[in-house]
Amino acid sequence: MFISNAFAQTAEAAAATGSWQGTVIQLGLIFAIFYLLLIRPQQKRIKQHEAKVRAIQKGDYVITGGGINAKVIDASDPIDLTVEIAEGINVSVNRGTLREVITAEEMKALKTAPAKKEPANSNKKSKK
């Protein structure tokens, strides 16, 4: 019985020393998956947004972080833009606060696109 206990202890010790390698491999795989599925796509979206903000020209439309829709009047300053939020009302907006940039061509396409029509009885329950 004394010998069998000794064998059991050595088996447990061998299993404990090999487990840290498996843990390191698992953590490495988890980090790789997070990087490929979460971090890398987010960095790509950020770079695309920054490129759009740098490429703003006069006549483009922007949406600020506060939800203000505006037309760009002057984009010559690298930090601020002058935008028109209503007829005759111009405001200076920091480029860093922009949430969305819509080019003049995209806006024309949006205005000319036909609106989707819902069926007239879409909200009514059918009678049985």
Image (cartoon, rainbow, N blue to C red):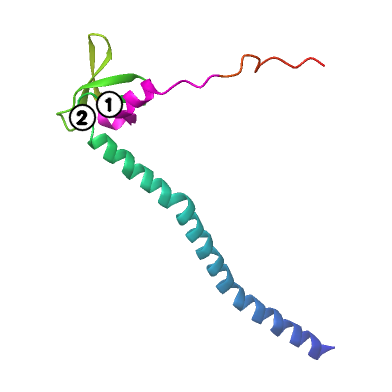
- Please rate how many residues cluster around mark 1, counting C-alpha atoms within 10 Å: few if below 14, some from 14 to 19, many from 20: some
The answer to which of marks 2 and 1 sits earlier in the sequence is 2
Local SS, label 2? loop
Snapshot quadrant of residue 109: top left
Which quarter shows the N terminus? bottom right
Q: Which residues are magenta?
A: 94-117
Q: Amino acid at mark 1?
A: Ala
Snapshot quadrant of residue 82: top left
Nearer the observer: mark 2 or 1; the answer is 1
Relative depth, front residue between 53 and 106: 106
Left or right: 18 in relation to 127: left
Q: Is residue 54 above or below residue 89?
A: below
Q: Where residue 28 appears, x then y in whole percent?
A: 50, 65
Left or right: 80 in relation to 42: left
Q: Which mark is residue 29?
A: none
Residue bearing mark 1: 104
Do labels 2 and 1 touch, CB within 8 Å? Answer: yes
Relative depth, front residue between 120 and 51: 120
Name the outermost residue toward the left: 76
Snapshot quadrant of residue 49: top left
Q: Amino acid at mark 2?
A: Gln
Residue bearing mark 2: 57
Question: What residue is shown at x 20% (from left), y 25% (from top)?
Answer: 58
Q: Residues under labels 2 and 1: Cα distance?
A: 9 Å
Queried whether the magenta region covers residue 74, the answer comes back as no
Q: Where residue 67 appears, x then y in whole percent?
A: 38, 21
